[in-house]
Image (tube, grey):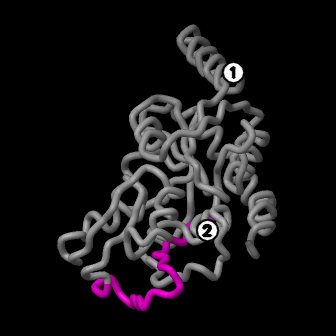
Amino acid sequence: MKKIIFLSLLLTALSSNFVFCQTLQIVMDYYPPFSHKENNEIKGISTQVVNAALKEAGMKASIKQYPFIRAYKMSQRNKDVFEYCVVKTKERTPLFKWVGIVGPATQVLFALKDRDIHIEKNEDLKGYRIGVVSEDVVDQYLSARQDKLGIKLDNVASYELNMKKLFKGRFDMWGGNKLVGLHLAKKLGYSKEAIKVVYTIDDLTDYYYLVTGLKTSDVLFQKMHAAFETIHSDGTYQGIIDKYLNY
């Protein structure tokens, strides 16, 4: 009996040491100002939060950028792969282990300023064409209601490409995060006043998370989860977010 207990404790210790030394595989998509690759460096609000959690956990990570749909499938289907930024919804909740919050998420529909578009509720979207990114939370939300609402969706893999198409008049509205939309408009050479928020999707106003698939070990998940709890309670997270509140 003593040998069994000893072996159990030894295996637990070895597992913990392996986790401590492990380099995490983390994926993200081009989602400025939350996550983006610039001059071969991964940057963004949520990237800073993730790095703070890694430092707290005493762990290293390899962070790589992929199109959202690829990153989403990688983290969902594989073992020990983490992803940010993912909005938590009823449909997504059972698909992942939710590690910790990496930023605020306000999902909106943008239109060009000179368009006479006024949306107060979902039903007012009837007849409009909306640009969304495949498997993004706005895409999932509107796709599930597409027939009921009578809307048309243009699905692509890039938020920036969609913003370009909005300015070219390819569709009526751009769906996605408010800060991301403003950032991309500015990057493309337009002022923030060139577009306007015509609808805020209250059902999707929540937070972005670092997530991992159900195959990931509980030991690894708990270690990162504990690190997130610490950086949220000691003010580290809020300090990072506050730098961008007036973006």
- Residue placed under numbered mark 2 in the picture: 185
Task: Name the foreground residue: 46 vs 117.
Answer: 117
Evaluate if marks 2 and 1 touch, with contact meaning CB atoms under 8 Å apart: no
Q: Residue at image x 59%, y 31%?
A: 25
Mark 2, Cα crowd under 10 Å, few <14 / some 14-19 / many 20+, is many
Residues in magenta, as a range = 104-124
Residue lying furthest left: 147
Q: Residue at image x 39%, y 90%?
A: 120
Rendered location of residue 147, percent (x, y) = 18, 71
- Residue placed under numbered mark 1 in the picture: 17
Residue 176 shown left or right of residue 184 in the figure: left
When the figure is inspected, residue 213 is found, relative to residue 160, above or below; the finding is above
Q: Residue at image x 50%, y 70%?
A: 167
Rendered location of residue 78, percent (x, y) = 43, 30
Residue lying furthest top: 3
Task: Name the foreground residue: 85 vs 143.
Answer: 143
When the figure is inspected, residue 227 is found, relative to residue 61, above or below; the finding is below
* Amino acid found under the numbered disc labelled 1: Asn
Q: Which mark is residue 61?
A: none
SS under mark 2: helix
Residue 224 shown left or right of residue 141 in the figure: right
Task: Name the foreground residue: 187 vs 46.
Answer: 187
